[in-house]
Image (cartoon, rainbow, N blue to C red):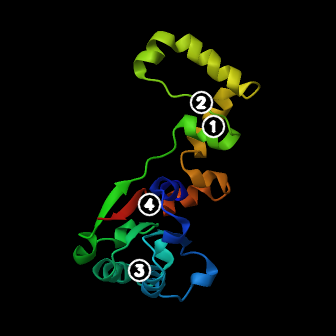
């Protein structure tokens, strides 16, 4: 979500990120929060964990109807986004899993190039040595096993203990106001 915020290139006073699982937001009306931010000149609000907000579906429908503001949200309750009057206002976007390259870049802080299929076919030995040189002493197969087991989603980096429950609870879609 923060990566999406950076790509919008909006001034900081026109963009707001919130996570609805933050304890201080419990009991606060999503509609009133957006109304206040909009009155200050807000242009875009990014809302993470929207399923934690009470009556979020009704609030988002009203926000869409009353404000000229872009809302980007994610949450674990994609099934609840089925109300026809609500769903027609939003587009569901698939949020893909991390690639092995992205996993290594996030976990180890490395920077790897990307290659076309043609480059890989014609230059695979050089590319392999280049990657091994970057990894130095890291065991690539050990890293790959960890990636396959639990590294496909970024919340792996928060804590690996409840990883599988997080996978089950998480949706793989992000909703964008049309």
Point out the image quarter for the C terminus: bottom left
Residue 62: image quadrant is: bottom left
- Nearest the camera: 123 or 41? 41
- Choose the circle earlier in sequence order: 3 or 4: 3
- Nearest the camera: 93 or 36? 36
Q: Is residue 117 rendered to the left or right of residue 25? A: left
How far across and down, in percent of the image, does residue 1 sit? 51, 59
Where disc 1 sits, the SS reads: helix
Q: CA distance from mark 1 to mark 4?
A: 23 Å
| Residue annotated with mark 3 | 56
| Residue annotated with mark 1 | 104
Q: Are marks 1 and 2 in contact (CB under 8 Å)?
A: yes
| Residue annotated with mark 2 | 112
| Residue annotated with mark 4 | 171
Residue 157 sits above or below residue 35 on the image: above
How far across and down, in percent of the image, does residue 149 sit? 59, 42
């Amino acid at each position: 979500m923060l990566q999406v915020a950076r790509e919008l290139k909006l001034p900081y006073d026109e963009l707001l990120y919130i996570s609805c699982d933050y304890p201080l937001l419990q009991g606060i009306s999503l509609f009133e929060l957006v109304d206040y931010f909009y009155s200050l000149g807000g242009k875009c609000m990014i809302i993470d964990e929207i399923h934690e907000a009470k009556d979020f579906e009704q609030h988002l429908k009203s926000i869409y109807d009353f404000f000229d503001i872009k809302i980007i949200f994610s949450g674990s309750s994609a099934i609840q986004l089925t109300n026809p009057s609500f769903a027609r206002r939003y587009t569901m976007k698939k949020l893909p899993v991390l690639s092995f390259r992205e996993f290594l870049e996030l976990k180890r802080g490395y920077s790897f190039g990307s290659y076309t299929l043609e480059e890989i076919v014609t230059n695979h030995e050089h590319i392999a040595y280049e990657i091994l040189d970057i990894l130095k002493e890291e065991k690539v197969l050990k890293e790959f096993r960890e990636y396959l087991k639990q590294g496909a989603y970024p919340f792996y980096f928060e804590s690996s203990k409840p990883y599988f429950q997080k996978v089950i609870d998480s949706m793989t879609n992000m909703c964008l106001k049309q």
